[in-house]
Structures are given as structure tokens and as C-alpha cells.
Amino acid sequence: MSKKALRIGWIGAGRMGYEMALRLAKAGCDLTVYNRTRAKAEPLAKYGVKIAGKVSELAVCDVVFCMVSTYTDVKAVVAGKGGLLSPTGKAARTVKRRAPRILIECSSISLEGSAELREILKAHGTELLAAPVSGNAKVIKAGKLSFVCSGPRAVFDEVAPLLKLIAPAASYVGEGELARIVKICHNVLLGITIQALCEITILAQKAGVPRHAFLEFINQSVMGSVFSRYKTPALVNLDFKVTFTPTLLRKDIDLGLDAGRRFEVPLPLASVTRDLIQSMMGAGMTEQDFSTLLVQQARASGIEIKPENVPVSDGLA
Ligand SMILES: NC(=O)c1ccc[n+]([C@@H]2O[C@H](COP(=O)([O-])OP(=O)(O)OC[C@H]3O[C@@H](n4cnc5c(N)ncnc54)[C@H](OP(=O)(O)O)[C@@H]3O)[C@@H](O)[C@H]2O)c1
């Protein structure tokens, strides 16, 4: 599949969608982007991207990516009134194709939602590749994002060159909605891991170890990871600019707990973590990064934390 010959559509220019679409644009793809709040997509125009005023304008594309928030949003934007599948104007007059051939759906959504979406798309002759991702906007910029994909193998093979333009790693895990459960498991681990990092960092601090010194050791130890390193600036210097909202993390842990019920798997650590995220949100901490769990942990430990103002690497450069 030649990237230039393909008309590519993109739905959702939020934190993730913007950076992902930008990589396609920089690679020279023929790209049209729709975002509900048009102003967020407009900066992409200087990279040759066409900005669509309506999502239905993307119906004439060959391949459309979707990166919005929840399954309710995916359904609204794809199958809702005026959505991708109800083209109007020029797109409706294009007799040959009124729906894209392939939808690559990247939002973190449930297995059930994804299966329903596949059925809806099938009725329009559109194939679905479930393709959620691991990494935040900075990770995308650093060229370190990864996709986990499921759906028809032939579709994955066909679009793999496009995925590679966005992320160096794209794993295919099987048919149907399997990628969704992999992503849900991944984000349950993400939630548990950030809470664990916050707990031990505050324990070390209260015992007298500066956070930067503690995390320098953890990052170099066998327990260090890409994640612990890129969260270090937040934990040391309290840089809580949003990478991922508490609301979206709570959504993903809820998806994990739902899956645990469906498959009869106890998830004790996920349950506790979910309640801790809920406590933080109930206390009004919703607008900053999910790593504000550190602040909640400090309060629960009777200490007040301040930025250490020590230069620390996020390991992504
Ligand atoms: N941030 C991360 O680190 C991260 C990492 C991996 C996966 N994810 C997943 O990726 C998805 C996007 O996350 P994000 O951080 O990019 O979120 P975000 O910054 O809040 O962006 C959400 C995007 O969805 C659009 N949207 C939401 N509801 C919509 C609706 N009903 N109709 C049309 N458009 C709608 C928003 O449009 P407006 O601009 O108009 O609001 C925006 O473009 C989520 O499923 C999230 O769980 C996030």
C-alpha cells in the first residue's frame, strides 16, 4: 500500500490524536483530520493536512483512524447522527464508496464496545482493526509509541506500513477484539504502577531520602522502566501538566474491573487502585496529570511536598 496513493482520514486531535496524526503528516501522507473542536486540529494545516468541518467528510477516505475518549464517543462519532457513516454533501453523492474501507480504532475501549463497532461497520462494508496504543504524547514525539492490534490479519498486514509511520512497534495479537483486553490489562498495570511508585517515593521521602535521589536509584535498578523514568519529572519536580487525565485512567481501571467480573478473575490491586483514583478525583484533583496520586499519598502520610527543582531526565530524549 503506497502511503501517497491512499486517502487517509483522522478523527480526534486530542493529546494523543494530534501527535499521532502529525507523524503521518510529516511522513507526507494525504491526510484529512476532523476534530470536534476544530481549533485543536488547525495547527496541523501547516503540515499539509486538510481540516474537515464535519466528520462525514472522511467517508470518502480509504482508511480512517479514530482516537477519541470512550466507546460512547467512538459510537457517536462513527455511527451517530451526522457521523462518519452518515455522509452528507459531496461524500453522499460519491456513489462508489460512502464508507471507508478500513477503520483503525485506537481509543482505549471495552471488548463489548469494540465488538459492537465491528458489527456496525460490517454492515457498511468497512473492516475494523482494533489498534489501541501504549505511550503518551511525549512518547509519540520521541518515536516510541507502540500499537497492539487485532482483527483480520490481512488488514493488519495491509496497514502495517502506516502504523510504522506513527509507532515503531505494532504487535498483532489475533482476531476480533483481543487487542482491547491487552490494552485494558496494560492500563490496569499502569494505574497500579503509578500508585506503587507514589507510595514508595513518599515512604522514602518521609524517612529522609530526597525524591530525586530515590528515583535515580530506582530508575537504574532492575525495577526501573521507561515508565518510571518518564514519570520522574512529575514525581520530583511536581510537573503535573496533563499527559493522561485521572478520568481516563479511572475509565480504564473500570474496564479492567468489568473484564475481571466477566472472566471471573479477582483483581484486588486494581480494586484498591481504582478507589484511590476515585478518592483523588472526589477531592477535586481532576484537572492535572494522573500522577497527582503523589500529592494524595503525601497528604495521607502527613507531609507536604514541594518541587525539588532538580534537573531530572524523562529518559525519552
Ligand atoms: N493520554 C495518554 O497518555 C493515553 C495513552 C494511551 C491511550 N490513551 C487513550 O487514547 C484516547 C484519547 O486520549 P487523549 O489523552 O488524547 O484524550 P483527550 O486529549 O481528552 O482527547 C480526546 C479527543 O476525543 C475527542 N472527543 C471526545 N468525545 C467526543 C465526541 N463525543 N465526539 C467527537 N469527538 C470527541 C476530543 O475532541 P475535543 O477536542 O472536541 O474535546 C479529543 O479530540 C482515550 O481513549 C485514552 O484512554 C491515552
Image: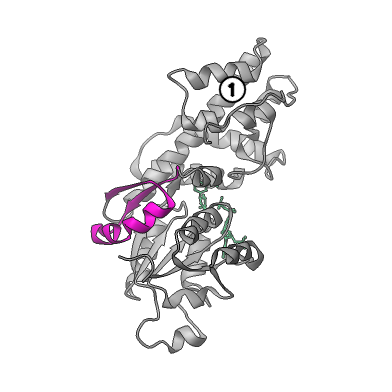
| Residue 214 in the image: above or below residue 256 | above
Count every numbered label the image shows and give the total: 1
> In the depicted view, which residue is nearer to us: 196 or 55?
55
> In the depicted view, which residue is nearer to us: 221 or 250?
221
Which residue is outermost to the top?
A: 207
Confirm if mark 1 falls within 8 A of ligand 1.
no
For the record, the magenta segment spans: 144-173
Residue 272 in sight from this viewpoint = no
Coordinates of residue 174 in the picture (x, y in percent):
26, 51
Coordinates of residue 55 in the picture (x, y in percent):
52, 73
> In the depicted view, which residue is nearer to us: 206 or 15?
15
Name the residue tied to disc 1: 199
Which residue is outermost to the left?
A: 154
Residue 158 magenta-highlighted: yes
| Residue 178 in the image: above or below residue 208 | below
Coordinates of residue 254 in the picture (x, y in percent):
50, 44
Q: Residue at x 38, y 46 (%)?
A: 168
Q: Is residue 258 left or right of residue 274?
A: left
Residue 165 magenta-highlighted: yes
Q: Is residue 121 left or right of residue 204?
A: left
Quadrant for residue 29, please give it.
bottom left
Of the 4 image quadrants, the one containing the N terminus is bottom left
Q: SS class of the residue under badge 1?
A: helix
In which quadrant of this rendering is ligand 1 seen?
bottom right
Q: Is residue 159 left or right of residue 93?
A: left
Quadrant for residue 105, please give it.
bottom left
Residue 280 in sight from this viewpoint = yes
